[in-house]
Image (cartoon, grey):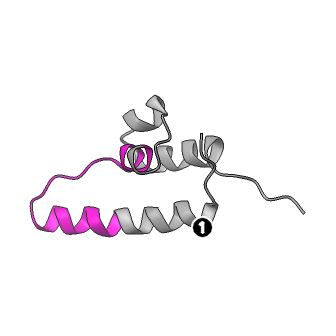
Amino acid sequence: MPKLSIELVQGEQRSWSQMNEALKYADGNSIPFGKYMNDKFSLNDPVLSKEVDTAMAMLILLKDHVKEFRD
């Protein structure tokens, strides 16, 4: 599985949030953040893909898909 940087995940969350708000305003349909990230980065994580809560999806991403930097 790819390992993502925390900065990338935070940036994607901001972008997804803006897109989500625009779609709500336009009466469009959006996909949950977890599915969005799973599909965009080919994470192959069925738990992440099914998670509908943005905060829980972020926790899954941080726990399983963000690389650690050690000094």
For the residue marked with disc 1, what is the amino acid?
Answer: Glu
Quadrant placement of the C terminus: bottom right
Q: Residue 11 or 21: which is nearer the viewer?
A: 11
Q: Which residue is mark 1?
A: 7
Kind of element beneath mark 1: helix
The residue at 44%/29% (across/down) is 46
Which residues are drawn in magenta? Answer: 17-38
The residue at 40%/51% (across/down) is 40
Q: Residue 37 or 21: which is nearer the viewer?
A: 37
Where in the figure is residue 65, as x and y percent of width and height? 61, 45
Q: Is residue 70 magenta?
A: no
Q: Is residue 2 above or below residue 25?
A: above
**Mark 1: few, some, or many residues within 10 Å (few <14, many ≥20)?**
few
Q: Is residue 67 above or below residue 10?
A: above
Seen in the image, is 60 located left or right of residue 66? left
Seen in the image, is 28 located left or right of residue 53? left
Query: Main SS of the magenta segment?
Result: helix
Where in the figure is residue 37, as x and y percent of width and height? 43, 50
